[in-house]
Image: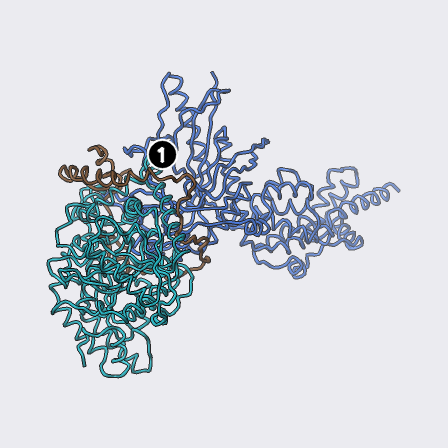
Chain colours: A cyan, B blue, C brown
Amino acid sequence: MTHPSQLGIGDLRTALDGKKTSSVEVTTALLETINAGKKYNAFIEVSNEQALSQAKAADERFARGERAPLLGIPIAIKDNILAVGTKTTCASKILGNFLSPYDATVTKKLRASGAVIIGKTNMDEFAMGSSNETSTYGSVKNPWDLDRVPGGSSGGSAAATLAGLVPGALGTDTGGSVRQPASLCGIYGLKPTYGRVSRYGVVAFASSLDQVGTFARSAADLASLTEVISGHDALDSTSVAKAAPAYSSALTKGVKGLRVGVPKEYFIKGLDPEVEKAVLTAIRKIEDLGATAVPVSLPHTEHSLAVYYVLAPAEASSNLARFDGIRYGFRIPEPKDLKDLYYRTRSEGFGKEVKRRIMVGAFVLSTGYYDAYYLRAQKVRTLIAKDFTNAFTQCDVIASPVAPTTAFKIGEKMNDPIAMYLSDVFTIPVNLAGLPSMSVPCGMDGKGLPIGLQLIAKPWDEEALFQVAGAYEAATNWHSMRPAA
Amino acid sequence: MEFEAVIGLEVHLQLQTKSKIFCGASADFGASPNEFIDPLTLGLPGSLPVLNRRVAEFAVMLGLAMNCEIRQFNRFARKHYFYPDLPKGYQISQFDEPICERGHITVHFGDAVRTIGIKRIHMEEDAGKNIHDTRTHSSLVDLNRAGVPLLEIVSEPDIRSPSEASAYLKSVRQIARFLEISDGNMDEGSLRCDANISLRPVGQLKFGTRTEIKNINSFKFVERALEYEIVRQMAVLKSGKEVAQETLLFDSAQGVTRAMRSKEESADYRYFPDPDLPPLVINESWIEEIREKLPKLPEQRLKEFCEVYGLSTYDAAILTAERACADYFEAVFKVCNNAKSACNWVTSELFGALNKQSVDIKETPVSAQHLGELIKLVEGETISGKMAKSVFEEMFATSKSPGEIVEAKGLQQVTDDGAILAIVRQVFEQNKSQATEFIGGNDRLHSFFVGQTMKLSKGSANPKKVNELITAELSRLRAEAQK
Amino acid sequence: MFSSDDIKKLGKLAHLYISQEEEVELIHKLSAIIEHVDHLTSVDVSAVQPMSHVHGSTNVTRSDELTPGLSIEDLMKNVPDHSGRFIRVPLIVE
């Protein structure tokens, strides 16, 4: 049998259902792969013993006749998602010792489907970053080139999925943190519609923007994984009771008659010409398959970055106020007094980028500035969302680049926050509008680095994304490319 | 120059829901520390709030009872500050979009009737509790109370004296208890009060500088604190200085107000709408639904008790102080149909017995039905009023019906003339010397003979009849003596 | 442009100690970010409502029922300092 690291979710399902292998076998093999893949630094915690006992339990469930999509299949989850039996660190010193006291809803759903939660992946601290360079546990390396970033903030999940350490993984996407690493690693990444997947048990960064997303190496795998975690959750007031259709069935629908919107504002100066070429070629390919490209306009796009860099830090500064060393997490030894406990715990516990964003957030919410910054940004956000609603009267999906460049070198953008923030310029508007969006492998640049195509659909229309991805995948080979071993 | 006090009160009312405002942990109290905890109560990463619908209902109920406008489009806001009993580092509250606004209530105090404006009512979550242990130089945090639902009621600065302030508080408490949304207990902290007070020359419209007195925990202390503050501010103003705007605590032991030692400039709470909670839209039909289910309010019941039952304002006020009492009274009335008697029996005998044993009316061993029956027995002259009191004692001790007790002890009042006369004659027989004196003209012995007759009949003779028959027997015996 | 005082004030609001070095860096970096954000003033928002929930959700509530919570052991698993069942912190001085 092919080594499990070469098999996707679907193939593993077939092998397990066909009794060609067992969950214990698969899990053991992948634990070895993970161990051999330490150079990527993709994992913060590997649940060696627990994974094997979960695998054993899965095999027992299988033996009793139970069948479920992920039964016995190892999946990794980003280390800002709570799972009992693991720590949840958010790659931060301030949660370095935090034992998850409860399961996130998405974790519960994975367990119900029989998945083996094999470990917690590395990430930018508190999900704030686009390169996975701000982690307390060191940078994640892009398996395509170990001197380059995998993207962020879900860099660990992306790298682990690409390198075959797992067949699929969960990440979170607030401004592009699933799509951008998927693009830089050459795999599939999906951010569902805001409210499609529960945020309960996912450490909040920006509450009105965060969504749990999925990584996989094929569109069908992505569909299976996304189906398992989707659905309304009474514990999350922002989740919406919309029936989640079986995305897998959209994969073979084909794109005849589909209108693909091409937004002119996304093809700008600063976009790497090779990336532009690959994306435009991909759009033409989709047209060849039966779709029609239509030019659309999203006029408020230029304000997206500014809106995001007011709203996200504001919500983050609020969400991170709970980290004070009092009820859990890191606490400085021997505080002088209560004030010292708060100040020193937070100052030593948070990294630089996190502190910077907390300060920006405090500023835009402070008295005298709230109206000019936060309130105004929320209004411009309404305009950005309206842009998409208008565009979707003329098309069914929107296609654009995911990131302006391919994977950049580690350390290259760390000193220039604005340059770093620009890596998310195409992905951010999607979070502001709460839309579903997918990164699809669509090319390689001259350096052999992957390029991703971003597909964006109407709220609740993840099916349209799978429709295009399925058709495009059947006609191309980009998604099968792997780095040399 | 004459000054007047301008007082506004902020009341925090803890609601008696089963669960907390934003999560399913228990809102009960009295448990061991950190028993009612869950991810949101602990402010754990990944926890999320979900609004308890009951809290919104209670808020609308209170708003309607206080004649407020109910806001259609409501949002919650995060109020940020750092404190060990505030697990998330922010409190979920309402800021510029409170659920109720622009209301008023009528407050009776003494003979006066005042209308006090209600500026706003909003929903928010309570914080936990800190216990300070100076010995070990540490503070101990209990988060049981964190997340318990509160309604904050802010009055207009319409209150003009400390006694008016405590009358207002009592009215608020009464309304809350009538609605059964809170037990309004200042001792237990389910009703808390902060007071704002300033002085200004009579006739001036502009407000003076006000001070805020926080967390005063009894009606009496509210009056004392305000009285002290009036005197203090007056002295400052009279000496030509300005009153400093500050936050004060009331030291109940010393009877003085003291500035709080927090050095910080006024806090910047950085309010913004909570992104975890979608807006709450309250439409007309929901409000009407709630309005229809509202119980009668104290003001209305007071009026009814005066008009329908013909009770004095004084008596009506006593009976309508608590909804349970008003309900009890009306249940008694239903049985005996005599408002005056019912009122007397309830307010003196029943309340007296309940207070003596520290029993709440809700746990009364004497049901309204039984009390009504007892009153009927007295009215029907089956037993005397005096007998009834001892029957009542028995009823209170055993919860038995009056009928049962009277039956069992053979306490029916004797009203038969013949039977009573026989006893009277027996008394005359047994007390020959007094009888002679009595017949001889000493009318003062009349009560002696009444007493002896009652005694001999073991209290069961109808006193009125006894009186009549002794008078009649006396006349007969005197007439005989003259023959 | 941020001043040193501005940074100190924000540090207080966020309960963060800011060293001299960090202050210099923050003045520079925060100013750059805010400068970038300032161009939002050029957008006409006179007829626009601020966004509440991106898909317009309203009235998400639960009924007043108890749900199972966490145990004291769950709390103790992670609490840095405690005294019996209480969470312990340095004395709060009012």
Pinpoint residue A429: horizontal percent, then vertical percent.
Answer: 31, 51
Is B361 or A158 nearer to us in this picture? A158
Left or right relative to B460: residue B81: left
Q: Quadrant of the C terminus of chain B?
A: top right
Q: Residue at x 14, y 60 (%)?
A: A446
Pinpoint residue A26: horizontal percent, then vertical percent.
Answer: 20, 76
Is A485 or A44 nearer to us in this picture? A485
Q: Is residue B304 visible?
A: yes
Pinpoint residue A28: horizontal percent, then vertical percent.
Answer: 17, 75
- Residue furthest to the right in view is B483
Q: Which residue is mark 1?
A: B249
Pinpoint residue B435: horizontal percent, then vertical percent.
Answer: 76, 44
Is A24 or A5 nearer to us in this picture? A5
For residue B418, above or below residue A231 = above
Q: Is residue A44 visible?
A: no
For residue C36, above or below residue A320 = above
Type of residue at label 1?
Leu
Q: Quadrant of residue A309?
A: top left
For residue B268, above or below residue B389 = above
Is B214 or A109 nearer to us in this picture? A109
Left or right relative to B202: residue A174: left
Crowding around mark 1 (Cα neighbors within 10 Å: few <14, some 14 to 19, many 20+) is some
